[in-house]
Amino acid sequence: MHVLVTGGAGYIGSHTVRELIKAGHRVVILDNLSRGHREAVAVLQKTTPAGTLDFVPGDTGDHALVSGLLQERGIEAVLHFAAHSQVGESVERPELYYRNNVVHGLSLLDTVREGGVKYFIFSSTAAVYGEPVEVPVSEEHPVVPANPYGATKLAFEGALRWYGRAGGPRWMALRYFNAAGADPDGDLGEDHRPETHLIPLVLQAALGLRPAISIFGTDYPTPDGTCIRDYIHVTDLAVAHVLALHALVRGAAPAAYNLGNGSGYSVLEVVRAAEAVTGRSIPVRHTGRRAGDPAVLVAGARQAGQMLGWRPRFADLRTIIDTAWRWHQKHPAGFETV
Ligand code: UFG
């Protein structure tokens, strides 16, 4: 199948492109490189068979460009990753999130519907649930986003649902918990600017690139007082997208599924696991809570297993950190490291 991947130069998008090509699909990446990396595309082009991958720089909101691509390439499925994804930034600059994640997203969806594309997979987030009222958080949990990032992702899920009933594509939305780790081959990984995510920050501290890691709050109602999250390996997320696409092709009903391991680790447990993996001591500094952090966020992810046949391969926290560590050691300055 010929697949359009928006945001394919980004962290989860690039890993998914690799898994799509491994599964025998041809891919066109559409990415404006505002957050993604040209170097990630170059790595993918170097490591995939000739003729399986093409890169087109541009915006999802560019109707003429996207419409031309859909027709010229005979695109049958769109996997949509292109979005802003920093919770803190979304609170400070909601306009960026509504414009990019909702306005440009809707333009893409209009173009996709006009172009008769059959399948659409959407990169969604656990942030749609907001502060959990029950853990583990299943797909039936109320959706009350606590920030514009989650609100814009939920808005787009709603559009997918209603467009789907009005001649739009058949769709699945995949709600990730905490994406982490790197491709086991070591050539694709996580490179956000600025970096705000715990595991890359911890590994940068292990490399001596940061003096210490700040622990955001030690007075949460958890066993060690720090927040608990469900870390899920990026390659497991990537594989779930391929399975979701194949399920849609087989006739599965449109739905939103959680993607997580179903087990949580505290911030301090992550730091200790990273010390064990790296063999280095990681200095910590206790600071106050970060606004908007729920104490515990763990996925109820049984439905993705049952409906998509998805089984995470890299569920162990140390394995997740080990793959990220290999990437960070080889790429201390991210994709800019030659
Ligand atoms: N943390 C620290 N110090 C840091 C960075 C993070 O203590 O320097 C803590 C956070 O407070 C949180 C945990 O580590 O408790 C994980 O934080 P991340 O920033 O890595 O991830 P979040 O849980 O905030 O959010 C991530 C994604 C969101 C997504 C959410 C869903 O960034 O896009 O997971 O679970 F919505």
Image: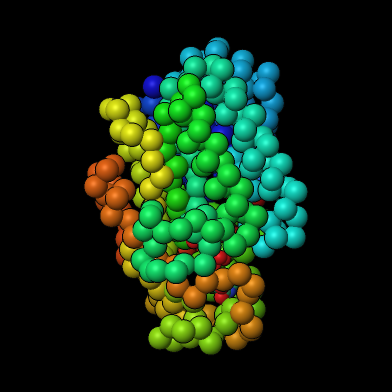
Q: Position of residue 45 (x, y in %)?
A: 51, 32
Res 116 visible: yes
Q: Is residue 230 left or right of residue 112?
A: left
Q: Residue at x 75, y 55 (%)?
A: 93
Q: Nearer the viewer, residue 51 or 124?
A: 124
Q: Residue at x 68, y 41 (%)?
A: 100
Q: Position of residue 300 (x, y in %)?
A: 34, 60
Q: How many marks?
A: 0
Q: Indicate the quadrant where residue 223 lies.
A: bottom left
- Up-down relation of residue 45 to residue 153 (above or below): above
Colouring chosen for the image of the structure: rainbow
Q: Position of residue 272 (x, y in %)?
A: 43, 80
- Up-down relation of residue 96 to residue 253 (above or below): below
Q: Is residue 64 left or right of residue 45?
A: right
Q: Position of residue 264 (x, y in %)?
A: 38, 70
Tell me which image quadrant ligand 1 sits in: bottom right
- Up-down relation of residue 329 to residue 23 (above or below): below
